[in-house]
Image: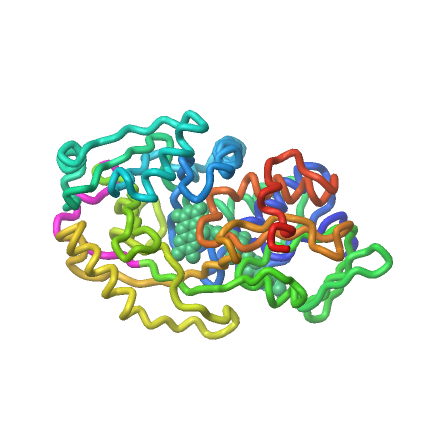
Amino acid sequence: MHYDVIVIGVGSMGSAACYHLAKQGVSVLGIEQFDITHDKGSHAGQSRLFRKAYFEHPDYVPLLQRAYRGWSDIEKESGVQLLYRTGITYFGSRDGDLLKAIGKSASIYGIPLKWYDNREAAMKWPQFSLQSDHVGLFEPDAGFITPELAIKTLTKLAEKEGAEIIPNTEVSEWQVSDDLVVVKTSGKTFKSKKLVIAAGPYTKKLLAEFKPALNVTQQLLAWVNPERWDDFTLGNFPCWVMESDEGEGIYYGFPILPNDRFSPPYGLKIAYHRPCQEIDPTDVLEFDASEEEEVLRAMTEKYLPGAMREVVTFKSCLYTYSEDDHFIIDKFPGYEDQVTIACGFSGHGFKFAPVVGEALAQLSLNDATSLPVDFLNISRFN
Ligand SMILES: Cc1cc2nc3c(=O)[nH]c(=O)nc-3n(C[C@H](O)[C@H](O)[C@H](O)COP(=O)(O)OP(=O)(O)OC[C@H]3O[C@@H](n4cnc5c(N)ncnc54)[C@H](O)[C@@H]3O)c2cc1C
């Protein structure tokens, strides 16, 4: 019942934190309120884009380079493939915010990109019907990760290194008393020297005094049946991102993944990345997909004709937006000696899990980290 570090939340960042902490030889307990991987948090839905020419901000690129190596190390150690280097094609106008921001990160960090003018892009990716001002920008060293398998793999590796993981157990309360962390679940009390809170959309429930706003939104993911199935399968169709014409966010999607190697649903996955409906994550997650379905239908009719012959299924997943859409990785104010938090991943955090886990382990064990996460500290909101 007494550990060096307790991690609350064994999802994307918590599983990686457990893994990195256990590798340091300390005693670790990870507590997860649901199964190890579930659809009531932020990590469900078969695939996550991995890209390095980061349009959100160039400061993320060094972390992405480290995360990329991190995923490779985890794959080698586990023997499980998690990252698929398919490349990603970005579509938009050459002078639009999206392609300019991608180009900026790429030029600062020497990330290879290949430009295709409108005619070349239309020939290379004939599945798309591009606007006359659209060009294509291909990032070869990008692709997608399988999130559920990644979390299960990280959890198994953490356990192999000696971590104890307890699923289906909610932490109801934590406190610091006489320099020790006390964590309560129904019926049990655990103690540790340090605490990591990686609770995703449930962060506010555990951190009532947390100051920067965290807004949880319910996002739609759609799997659809295209008319010409073979045009959209892995190997024939890229991961893609397109500047949205709604003036906010991006449309994106993945190729159809073979059902003998990937978990369901089986179909062409498409989505729209921008804040959807705000919700309380503890509410029942009933989702009215009609409005989002309309947006996706209009998008596919315009840009991917023939892609949305029929809907296979809709699923929803939760974003936790910080006030500036950037992550929060830091010591928890008022409890700096004991508590480290990671939250507010604002719909783009999964690809970073290995490096976030490493930063959380360092902050927790050494009170500082050598990783460049300073720009993600809490004091920026003061
Ligand atoms: C639709 C969608 C698409 C996305 N696409 C991408 C993408 O293409 N690329 C990308 O990089 N990122 C993407 N993301 C974002 C990424 O998935 C998230 O940023 C990431 O999963 C956040 O990880 P987390 O650890 O904060 O949350 P989670 O993975 O949800 O983990 C938090 C865990 O804490 C547990 N927990 C909470 N409270 C307690 C408690 N009291 N006791 C015990 N356990 C508790 C939860 O049950 C949960 O398992 C997407 C997200 C969504 C929803």
- Quarter of the picture containing the C terminus is bottom right
Q: Residue 186: percent from the left, percent from the top? A: 68, 70
Q: Position of residue 147 (x, y in %)?
A: 44, 48
- How is the model colour-coded? rainbow
Task: Judge whether residue 230 can be spotted in this image.
Answer: no
Q: Is residue 339 visible?
A: yes
Above or below — where is 273 with respect to 140? below
List x then y, in percent, for residue 112: 36, 26
Q: Which residues are magenta?
A: 222-235
* Left or right side of 295 for 192: right
At x 43%, y 71%, the residue is 285
Q: Nearer the viewer, residue 314 or 323?
A: 323
| Quarter location, residue 179 | bottom right
Indicate yes or no whether the magenta region holds residue 226: yes
Q: Residue furthest right?
A: 178
Left or right: residue 84 versus residue 323 is left
Count of marks placed on residues: 0
Q: Is residue 380 left or right of residue 256?
A: right
Residue at (79, 60) in percent of width and height: 176
Foreground residue, 37 or 333?
333
Expressed as whole percent of the image width and height from the top left, the position of residue 100 reads 34, 38
Q: Residue at x 47, y 47 (%)?
A: 350
Q: Quadrant of the N terminus?
A: bottom right
Q: Residue at x 48, y 34 (%)?
A: 68
Q: Quadrant of residue 287?
A: bottom left
In the rendered image, residue 345 lying in the magenta stretch gets the answer: no
